Image (spheres, coloured by chain):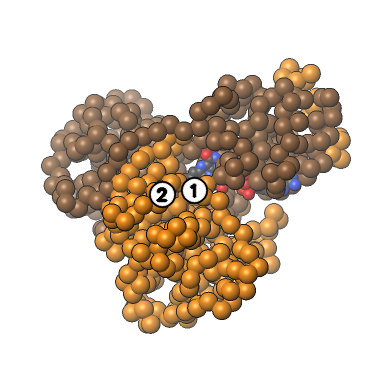
Amino acid sequence: MTDVLAVTDHRRGDLRDVSYEIITAGRELADETGGNLHLAVISGTVDEFADDLNREGVDAIHTVDHGEEFNHDVYTQAISQLYDELAPQYVVAPNSVNGLDYAPAVANELDLPIVTDTIGLETDGETLLATREMYGGKVETTNELEGAAVVTIRSAEWPKAEGTGDASIEAFDAEIDEDAIGSTVTGFEEVGGGDVDISEADVLVSVGRGIEEEDNIPLIEDLAEALDATVSSSRPIVDNGWLPKNRQVGQSGKVVTPDVYIAIGISGAVQHVAGMKGSDTIVAINTDPNAPIMDIADYAIHDDLFDVVPALTEEFQ
Amino acid sequence: MKILVTVKEVATVEDEFEIEGTEIASQYLGADLNEWDDYAVEEAVQLQENGIADEVVTVTIGPEDCEQTIRQALAKGADRAIRVWDDALEGVDLLDVNAKTEILSAVVEAEEPDLVLTGVQAGDDSFGATGVSLAEEIGAQWGAVVNHLEHDLEDGVASVRRELEGGVEELTEIDLPAVLTIQTGINEPRYASLRGIRQAQRKELDVQALADIGVDEGTIESELELTEMYEPESESDVTVWEGSADETAAELGELLREKGVAQ
Ligand SMILES: Cc1cc2nc3c(=O)[nH]c(=O)nc-3n(C[C@H](O)[C@H](O)[C@H](O)COP(=O)(O)OP(=O)(O)OC[C@H]3O[C@@H](n4cnc5c(N)ncnc54)[C@H](O)[C@@H]3O)c2cc1C
Ligand SMILES: Nc1ncnc2c1ncn2[C@@H]1O[C@H](COP(=O)(O)O)[C@@H](O)[C@H]1O
C-alpha cells in the first residue's frame, strides 16, 4: 500500500488542465510513500489521452474504454475495481464538477475517508496532512488522516507535469455493470452568450454582493460609463437576476484577462478568482482588509464602495 | 412524492477575527442558513406548490442553537424538521463526510423520501461531498451541481442540468430515487412571510439522538482530524491606498490615466 492512483479529467474530446496537475500532485505523494504513480483514464478516446498523459513521473496508465463522455457510475465502478487491483494508498481525483460527482461515491463505496479541495498534501506514508481552506478562503487548515484515503485537488495549485514519460499503458478490463448505471447524459449546452463578451473588454468594472441591492447596480453602471469600461460581476449578482449570465466572471462563467479589473465588493472566492486572476492589473475595493481578493490584488482600497465608487465616477465625468 | 432536504447552519466570520486553537474565537462568529441549502429548500417547496411533492421534510445535524435557522426553512414552507444531535457529537471540531453520511443515511432509511436535495457545498467547511456520498450509501442515484430540475418527476426520472465549468451545462436524466446537490441560481429563494414565520413556530421539529435513529456512536467518529487553523500567508505585494474616499478614488483615477485606459 504505497502506490498512488490519480484519475484524469476530460470533456468533449479534450483533456482538462487539471489532468496534468494531478500527475504532479500524485508524483509528489508517490515520492513520499515510495510507491508508483498510476493514472486512470476512463471513457473517451482513451488511447489518445494516454499518449498525451505519458509525462515524466507517471509509472503506469490504465485505460478504461467505455463510452464517450463522463458517467459517474462508470467512473465509480472502474475506480473501485482499479483500487481492488492496485491497492493504492491514495486515490487522487480533481476537485472539478465531475470529480465531485464521483469521488465521494468512490470513497464511500471503498469505505475510505475523503478530503476535498486540497491545496497542499504531505505524507510520511502513513499519515496524510492535507491543507485546505475554510470560510471562503479566510483561513487555512491542516487535516490529518491515517491510512488510505481519497483526496481531491483544487485546480491550478500544482504545476502541470511536462516532459515525456515511459509509463506502461495498459487497457484495464473493468467489468461495468450496465444495470447499475442510473443516469444518462443527453447533451451539452453553452450558456451565457449574447450581445456582450466581457472577455473582450480592456477594463472591467466588476460588482459583487457588497452592492447589496439591485437598485444600487446603476452606481456601477455609471462608473463603467464614465470610464468607458464594461460591467461584469461575481456569481450572486447573476444568481439574483440583477445582471445577465454573460456578465459572470469565474469557474462557471467567463475567464477574463483585461488590462484592468476593478473588483468592487467581491470577496475573491476561489471560483471567482479562477476567472480573473490572469488580469494585468487587479484593483480591489472592499471594506474587509482580510478578504481573499487582497491576496491577488495589485492595488486595494479598504473602504466602503458606496463612498469610493461615486467619488471615482465624479473624477471622470 | 416526499422530499427530504438537508439543511445546515453554517458559521459566518466577521471581517476581523482571531483564531483560538483550531477554531475561530466564538465572538467573531455568526450563524446563517447555508446559502446552497436555501436554494434546495426553495426548490422542494416549489415542487410541493406545483403539486409534485406531498411533503417536504428537512434534516439537520446540529446542536439546539441551530433551531432558529431550521425554523427559517420551515417558515419558507417546509412541513416539518428533524434535528439530530447527541452528547457524543458535542465538542467535535469537524464532522467529516463519512460521519455525516452515516447519520443522514439513517434518517433517509426512516423517512424513505423519493428525492433528497442537498446543497452543492456548505459555505463554511466546503467539502462539497456530502450529497454524493449519501447517495452511494443509500443506494440511490445522484447528480452533483444541479442548476435546473424539470418539474415532471412522475415517470421516475429527474431531468436535470448539471453546471460544469466554463459556461457549459450537461443535460442528464437521473433515475429516482436520487440525491441532487443544488447549485445557487436554480431558483429565487423567497423571503419568509410574517405568516410563514408564525406558522413555523407551530411546525414539528423532531429532535433525535444517535441511538434513536439506530446509529452507533462508535461509527461516527471523524477520521479526518483538524490539527491546525491559521490565516493564509499573503503572497501579495498589494499597494493599499489610504485616506478619504476622495483621496483613494483620486489615486485609482491616476492609475487608470497612467495605464491609458481612461481619460
Ligand atoms: C461549483 C461552484 C461554482 C461557482 N462558480 C462561480 C463563478 O463562476 N463566479 C463567481 O463569482 N462565483 C462562483 N461561485 C460562488 C463562490 O463560491 C462565491 O460564493 C461567490 O464568488 C461570492 O461572491 P461575492 O464575492 O460577490 O460575495 P461575498 O463572498 O458575499 O463577498 C462580498 C464582499 O463584499 C464586501 N463588502 C460588503 N459591503 C461592502 C461595501 N459597502 N463596500 C465594499 N465592500 C463591501 C465584503 O467584505 C465581501 O468581501 C461558485 C461556487 C461553486 C460551489
Ligand atoms: N450538519 C449538517 N446537517 C445537515 N446537512 C448537512 C450538514 N452538513 C452538510 N450538510 C448538507 O450537505 C451539503 C454539502 O455539505 P459539505 O459536503 O459539507 O460541503 C450541504 O449543503 C448540506 O445540504
Tint of chain A: brown
Q: Amino acid at mark 2?
A: Leu
Q: Secondary structure at mark 2?
A: strand
Q: Residue at x 18, y 33 (%)?
A: A169
Amino acid type, mark 1:
Ile
Q: Is residue A160 visible?
A: yes
Quarter of the image for residue A293 reads top right
Of B31 and A166, the residue lying toward us? B31
Q: Quadrant of the C terminus of chain B?
A: top right
Label 1 close to label 2 by CB (< 8 Å): yes
Secondary element at image label 1 = loop
Mark 2 = which residue?
A: B149
Task: Please provide percent x and percent y for residue B117.
Answer: 42, 59
Q: Residue at x 55, y 32 (%)?
A: A246
Ligand 1 sits in quadrant? top right
Asked if one can make out residue A165 in the rendered structure from this viewpoint, the answer is no
Q: Chain of mark 1?
A: B
Looking at the picture, do discs 1 and 2 lie on one chain? Answer: yes
Q: Quadrant of the N terminus of chain B?
A: bottom left
The orange-tinted chain is: B
